[in-house]
């Protein structure tokens, strides 16, 4: 019953956070810049790989495209 009286049980509603307890933009950037840098690097790697595979599969001069079209015509 003590949990119910203090409103700290598993079904309690979360308390409101005041403005002073939240981080500002500058403080958040200062604390989390390594995470933001890693995310930017991962996004760059993903975009590079996506462009590379699209170029390999769709460019008219790509040997992969010629190989896949030759293979698909041989199957028919």
Image (spheres, rainbow, N blue to C red):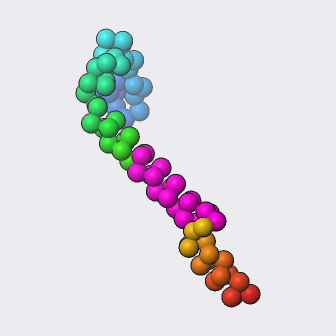
Query: Is residue 39 on the magenta stretch?
Result: no
Task: Spot the residue most to the front.
Answer: 61
What residue is at 45 percent from the left and 52 percent from the top? 48
From the viewer's perspective, is 7 left or right of 54?
Answer: left
What residue is at 71 percent from the left and 83 percent from the top? 73
Q: Nearer the viewer, residue 59 or 4?
A: 59
From the viewer's perspective, is 74 left or right of 1?
Answer: right
Q: Is residue 52 above or below residue 4?
A: below
Q: Is residue 76 above or below residue 18?
A: below
Q: Position of residue 11 (x, y in %)?
A: 41, 33
Q: Tell me if I can see residue 10 in this picture.
A: yes
Q: Position of residue 4 (x, y in %)?
A: 34, 27
Q: Quadrant of residue 19?
A: top left
Secondary structure mostly taken by the magenta-highlighted segment of the chain: helix
Q: Position of residue 67 (x, y in %)?
A: 59, 78
Q: Position of residue 37 (x, y in %)?
A: 32, 38
The quadrant of the rendering that contains the C terminus is bottom right
Q: Is residue 12 above or below residue 26?
A: below
- State how many labels appear: 0
What residue is at 36 percent from the left and 13 percent from the top? 18
Q: Nearer the viewer, residue 64 or 37?
A: 64
What residue range appears in magenta? 43-60
Q: Nearer the viewer, residue 1 or 8?
A: 8
């Amino acid at each position: 019953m003590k949990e119910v009286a203090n409103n700290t049980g598993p079904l309690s509603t979360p308390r409101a956070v005041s403005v002073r307890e939240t981080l500002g933009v500058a403080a958040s950037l200062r604390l989390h810049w390594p995470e933001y840098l890693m995310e930017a690097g991962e996004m760059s790697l993903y975009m590079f790989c996506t462009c590379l595979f699209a170029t390999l599969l769709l460019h008219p001069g790509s040997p992969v495209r010629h190989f896949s079209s030759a293979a698909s015509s041989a199957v028919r």
